[in-house]
Image (tube, helix red, strand yellow):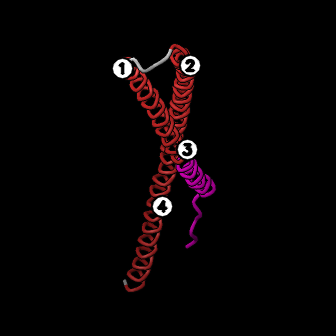
Amino acid sequence: MVRRRYPLDALGRLRDQRVEQETHRVAARTVEARRAGERLAQAAAARQAEEARVQAVLAEEAARADAGTVSAGELQGLARWQERAAEEVAASRRTERAREAELSQASTAERRARQALAQADADANAVARHRAGWQAEQDRAAELALEDQALEIWMARRGGRG
């Protein structure tokens, strides 16, 4: 008896290859999202450190002003320093917001890659289920052919004795 090839073998291979590709894409997007999260954490830490540094200097200068040990020139210098420090803190906040946007984009790309993988996997599973059903039909047809063959042999032998 001749074994028939599954007619959708090529499609099954393509679907399996697509699952493999999507798996690699998900892995890459996951790494990108993790790195974006790390960059965000670094930016947040840098902003917090900058804010803490500014607050510490301001607290120290306020204590000096309360003690009366600050000259008018030093107060003017402090005012200019505060402006620069405020600009640096604002830059740190802008950097942090940019990193948040990068994380959001990376997370969206990862989610989309996971969705594409789920679809590719579902497509591959559909072909696999179809193949299993097709194979069951082929096996059943082969079994019926063997039964018919056995019946014909039995009938021929029975007819020969009678």
- Contact flag, marks 3 and 2 (Cβ < 8 Å): no
- Identify the residue position indicated by label 2 in the image: 77
Sequence-first tag of 3 and 2: 3
Q: What is the C-alpha distance between the residues marked 4 and 1?
A: 92 Å
> Closer to the camera: disc 1 or disc 3?
1
**Disc ID at residue 135:** 4
**What residue is shown at x 60% (from left), y 51% (from top)?**
21
Q: Nearer the viewer, residue 5 or 28?
A: 28
Q: Is residue 143 above or below residue 120?
A: below
Sequence-first tag of 4 and 2: 2
Q: What is the C-alpha distance between the residues marked 3 and 2?
A: 44 Å
> Closer to the camera: disc 3 or disc 4?
3
Q: Quadrant of the C terminus?
A: bottom left
Which stretch is magenta? 1-29
Residue 69: x and y, percent? 42, 21
Question: Magenta span: helix, strand or loop, mainly?
Answer: helix
**Disc ID at residue 32:** 3
Q: What is the C-alpha distance between the residues marked 1 and 2?
A: 18 Å
Q: Nearer the viewer, residue 25 or 36?
A: 36
Q: Identify residue type, mark 2.
A: Gly
Secondary structure of the residue carrying numbered label 4: helix
Q: What is the C-alpha distance between the residues marked 1 and 3?
A: 52 Å
Sequence-first tag of 4 and 1: 1
